[in-house]
Amino acid sequence: MTALGFHVTASLTEHAPAKINLTLRIVGRRADGYHELESLVGFAGIADTLSLVPDTETTLDIGGPYAAVCGPGADNLVLKAVDALHARIPELTGGRFKLEKSLPVAAGIGGGSADAAAALRLLARTNGVAPHDPRLLDAAKATGADVPVCVEPRPRVMRGVGEVLSSPVSLPRLPAILVNPRVALSTRDVFTAFAGMKSSDKPLPEIPRDAKSLLALLAAHGNDLEPAAVRCAPVVGEVLRALEALPEVKLTRMSGSGSTCFALFASADHAKAAARQLSAARPAWWVEATVIG
């Protein structure tokens, strides 16, 4: 029995879905050097998977296609999230985490942040902490800028440095493909390259619920970091051009600070066909058909 009065012994599992910045506007830069932003965020149907077996010692084992490029386990955001929540709940029980890493790393889709948020959800379940306990969000903010929006992975508008979240918004299901050229991009490098570039001056309006109106909104509100990312990694521009050339594509964009890009389609069949076509033409790229919502 933990000091929180709750006991879980079985392994628990959470999915950590890819975070997709459908729009991304850089609003300004704060005195501490961080950039403030405004972004409509959705989540894809593809995810990492994190499991937890409660134990007195906290460890992390990483497997999956992208395990080798995750870096030292001690630097992983999962363990940083554990430390952040433990600082707020000293009697917290941790345990043995197992991360199946299926999402590319340093890819602009919040893989590490989603993993950290999944860890917080697992710890909450293990310790009987309510899902909306403010200590969870405080720990998420302390772990990383993209972690708060991933704690409850539902579409929202994200503002500030990522800590100011709207209520969940209703988005239509958006058939899509995600493409990463297997090139990692440093967020710091992209923001450095962005210095002096122009930001959009159009704030997001109310988010429509139907697909046609949403696509029109997305077409009018892009990703301010795309030119900077292309400067850092020209292959991002190559990915965007390849997506634009696909049949039946409705919209193409880079997510976050890159290097993952996405294309939206009217149907899941169109998305799957496009993914097969692009995979055949670019076998070295990571290509996945999914749904964003």
Image (cartoon, rainbow, N blue to C red):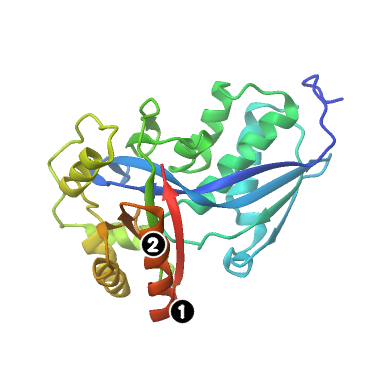
Name the residue carrying label 1: 284
Real-space CA distance between mark 2 and mark 1, rounded to the nearest whole angstrom: 14 Å
Q: Nearer the viewer, residue 239 or 149?
A: 239
Q: Give the number of the mark in front: 2 or 1.
A: 1
Left/right placement of residue 262 relative to residue 133 reads left
Using the image, determine if residue 91 lies above or below residue 155. above
Among numbered discs 2 and 1, the one appearing first in the sequence: 2
Q: CB of mark 2 within 8 Å of CB of mark 1?
A: no
Secondary structure at numbered mark 1: loop
Left or right of 103 in this view: 89:
right
Judge from the rendering whether residue 108 lies leftward or rightward of residue 208; answer left or right.
right
Kindly identify the residue that appears in the image at 52 percent across and 29 percent down: 138
Task: Give the number of the disc on residue 2.
Answer: none
- The residue under label 2 is which amino acid type? Thr
Residue 165: quarter of image: top left
Give the percent coordinates (x, y) of residue 9: 85, 35
Q: Quadrant of residue 161?
A: top left
Which amino acid does the dot numbered 1 rest on? Ala
Q: Is residue 248 left or right of residue 182?
A: left
Report the residue marked by disc 2.
260
User: Whole-percent x and y of residue 48?
Assistant: 59, 53
Mark 1, Cα crowd under 10 Å, few <14 / some 14-19 / many 20+, is few
Q: Is residue 75 visible?
A: yes
